[in-house]
Image (cartoon, rainbow, N blue to C red):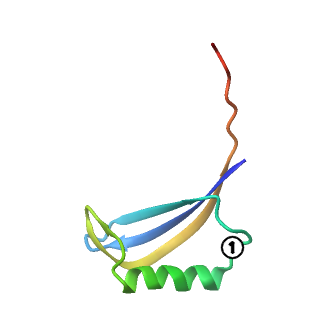
Amino acid sequence: MAKTLELSFVNEEEGITRISIENPKEPVELEELKTAMQEIVAANAVASKSGSLTSIKGAKLVERNVTEYDLM
C-alpha cells in the first residue's frame, strides 16, 4: 500500500498549492507537521506558478492500493 502525505497551502493568488511527500514517517505528529508547514511559508521556501505561499490550508494522508498486471 502506497502512502503519500499531501500538504496544502494558500498561495498569493488565493489558490491552493500542494506538496506531496511519498512514504512519510508515521505516525504523523500534528504539532510537528503544523510547525514545519508554517516554517515553509515563513522561509518562502516554495514558489508556485501562482506566487509564493501565504498560509497553510491543511494536510492529509492518502493511501492507495496498486495492482500491476504483467501483460507481456
Q: Quadrant of residue 48?
A: bottom left
Name which residue lies at 63% across and 13% down.
72
Q: Residue at x 68, y 68 (%)?
A: 25
Looking at the image, which residue is at 38% across and 65% down? 16
* Residue position marked by numbered label 1 in the rendering: 28
Tell me the residue at 56%/69% (across/down): 59
Residue projecting furthest to the front: 72
Residue 7 to residue 65: above or below? below
* Left or right side of 49 for 20: right
Tag 1: amino acid: Val
Q: Position of residue 7 (x, y in %)?
A: 51, 67
Q: Nearer the viewer, residue 13 or 44?
A: 44
Indicate the position of residue 53 as horizontal and vertical percent values: 34, 75
Q: Is residue 4 left or right of residue 1?
A: left
Disc 1, SS: loop
Q: Position of residue 13 (x, y in %)?
A: 25, 70
